[in-house]
Amino acid sequence: MANTSAGASRTDPFLTYNFQVKWNNNYVASVNKVTGLERSTQVVKWRSGGQPQTTYCIPGQTDYSPITLEQGVTFDVTFEQWANKIWYLPNTQQFGQEVSLADFRQQVTLEMYNQAGQLVLRYFLYNCWPSEYRALPELDAASDTVALESLTLQNEGWDRDTSVTAPTLPSFTEPSS
C-alpha cells in the first residue's frame, strides 16, 4: 500500500479512460485516446586516458516522443484548424505562404481523473505543434467501427504538475429506509 504526501492510502491504480486534454485554455471535446508520455536519454560512453579497459557512461541528449490524440470524426474542427496553421493549400495558392509561425505552437495540458471525477494527475506539455493530421481513417462499407481523426504533436518536453495533491476519496453510505 502506497502513501502519498497528503496521507491518503491508495491501493488501486488509476484507470486510463478518465482524462481531459486542454490547449488555448479550452478543453478539447471528445478526445478518446492519447498516446503515453515518453522520454529517452541517450547514453554517451567514454574512456579515460590510461584506462582503456574501463568504459564510463554519462547521460546525453533527451528526446521526447510525439503524442497522438484521437477523436471521433464530428463537426468539431479543432484538430483541423491547428493542423492548417502549418500547411493549408489555399494559402499556398493565393498568398504563397505555407506556415503560420505566429501561433502554431501551443502549451497542452493533460489531466487524469479518478473514478469519482476528481483530478489526480496533471501534466504540462511544452511547445507542441502538429506534425501529422489524419482527417479520415480508411473507409470500409463492411466495417462497423467509429471513424477517428488523429493529430500527432511534437513537443519539447513535459512536466508533472506537483501542485495537484491526492484528493479526499468520497465514501458511499447506504441510504436509510
Image (spheres, grey):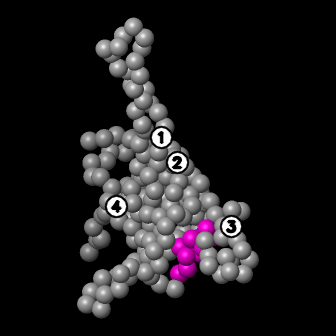
Q: Is residue 170 left or right of residue 122?
A: left
Q: Quadrant of the C terminus?
A: bottom left
How packed is label 4: few (under 14 Cα within 10 Å), some, or many (20 or more)?
A: few
N-terminal label among 2 and 1: 1
Circles 4, 2 touching at the beta carbon (< 8 Å):
no
3D distance between C-alphas at marks 4 and 2? 21 Å
Measured Cα–Cα span from mark 3 to mark 4? 34 Å
Q: CA distance from mark 2 to mark 3?
A: 22 Å
Q: Which residue is mark 3?
A: 100
Does 40 appear above or below 20?
above
Query: Which numbered disc flags the more N-terminal residue, 2 or 3?
Result: 3
Tell me if mark 1 has few (under 14), some (14-19) or many (20+) residues whose alpha carbon lies within 10 angstroms of its own: few
Q: Amino acid at mark 3?
A: Ser
Placement of the N terminus among the 4 image quadrants: top left
Position in image of residue 83 (x %, y %)? 57, 71
Of labels 4 and 2, earlier in sequence is 4
Q: Which residues are magenta?
A: 76-86
The residue sitting at 33% across, 16% down in the picture is 54
Is residue 172 or residue 81 the one in the foreground? Answer: 81
| Residue identifier under label 4 | 16
Observer-nearest of 163 and 99: 99
Q: Secondary structure at mark 4?
A: loop
Q: Are marks 2 and 1 in contact (CB under 8 Å)?
A: yes
Residue on which disc 2 sits? 157
The amino acid pointed to by label 1 is Thr
Residue lying furthest right:
95
Quarter of the view holding residue 5:
top left
